[in-house]
Image: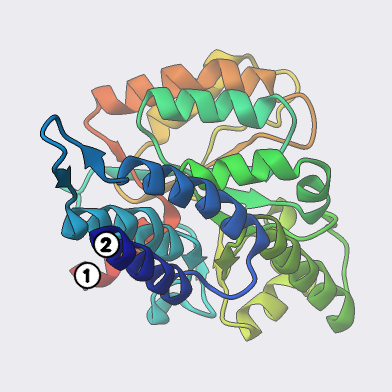
Amino acid sequence: MAIALAATAISFLIGTLLPENPPALQATDAVQVQNLNQSITAKELGNDRTEFHLDRAIEQLLTVLEPKEKRLTFVPPQQFQGTTIFQSKVKDSEKVIAFTVDDGPWPQTTEQMLDIFKQNDVKATFFWIGKSIENSPEIARRVVAEGHAIGNHTWHHWYHQMDAATAASEIDRTAQIIYETTGVKTTYFRPPGGVLNNGLAQYAKEQNYSVVMWSLTSADTDPRAKPQAFVKNVLKGAHPGAIVLMHDGGGDRSRTVKALPDMISGLKAQGYRFVTIPELLEMQEQAA
């Protein structure tokens, strides 16, 4: 009887909690639900009695599904929708900082950065290029599975002036592949190169995206700089509410990978903790 009730409850919860037609999400959750089903199968005890805790089973299922659905929707607080953000206004006592990573997902580099983030319990915000997702969908799914936030960085990474239709295509097409690949819906946007006057930022704001810039750069696109220079740039310029720019794609980012552990350890030594862009803006909203 308990097993039948559990099966009914699980079917109901899956149908209620999973969004419609996110293929990547369904595939990921199917594995986790299968594992959960195995873990909550009735256990035969020595005296042939069956031990089964239905409440615990449902609780476990909720932890698998509900938080994941919430993680897969990144919508800024209303006050930040349709605005441009360079940093978060938090109290000086709130030593929080947000790493943002542009131009991926990228073979090897993104995976190496994910390993470092995981080892150091750091969550970042990745701004993705549509073509990069098309080339590396499995890496994109790993980024999401490991709990990082996602933003839109256009399809082609163009800087030039665009008409309204082209700007819309660059952003909407990328939003679509993000969703189809990972199940993520996001209204955080970063314009390539930080260009705010070529039509992209205007379209994004019209669609209630938050246009996320940065207040601190690692300068990891400087072809002459050594990794330690990236570390110095970040540690010297760190301040509460800072948004840090770095890259995992668009070329050889091995120097960024090499610098990342020292950036993290140096910021932790200064008392900082790491948050995503959505978390940073939620903190500002709550402090207002």
Against 114, residue 75 (above or below) is below
Q: Report if residue 125 is visible in the image.
A: no
Q: How is the protein colored in the picture?
A: rainbow
Position of the C terminus, as image quadrant, is: bottom left
SS of the residue under disc 1: helix
Marking on residue 286? 1
Against 246, residue 222 (above or below) is above
What residue appears at the point 66 percent right and 64 percent down from the top-left corner? 179
Against 104, residue 46 (above or below) is above
Label 1 sits on what residue type?
Answer: Gln
Label 2 sits on what residue type?
Answer: Met
What residue appears at the point 41 percent right and 65 percent down from the top-left corner? 70
Marking on residue 139? none
Question: Does the residue at mark 1 contact the one at mark 2 (Cβ under 8 Å)?
Answer: yes
Quadrant of the rendered structure where residue 223 is?
A: top right
Which residue is outermost to the front?
A: 48
Position of the N terminus, as image quadrant, is: bottom left
Q: Tell me if 209 is positioned left or right of 68 in this view.
A: right
Q: Report if residue 134 is visible in the image.
A: yes
Residue nearest the observer in this picture, 65 or 57 = 57
Q: Tell me if 39 is positioned left or right of 98 in this view.
A: left
Residue nearest the observer in this picture, 198 or 31 = 31
What residue appears at the point 42 percent right and 57 percent down from the top-left corner? 68
Residue nearest the observer in this picture, 37 or 183 = 37
Residue corresponding to mark 2: 283
What residue appears at the point 33 percent right and 41 percent down from the top-left corner? 39
Q: Residues within 10 Å of mark 1 (few under 14, many from 20)?
A: few
Which residue is outermost to the bottom?
A: 206
Q: Residues within 10 Å of mark 2 (few under 14, many from 20)?
A: some
Quadrant of the rendered structure where residue 66 is?
A: bottom left
Q: Tell me if 249 is positioned left or right of 51 in this view.
A: right
Indicate the position of residue 77 as horizontal and vertical percent values: 39, 75
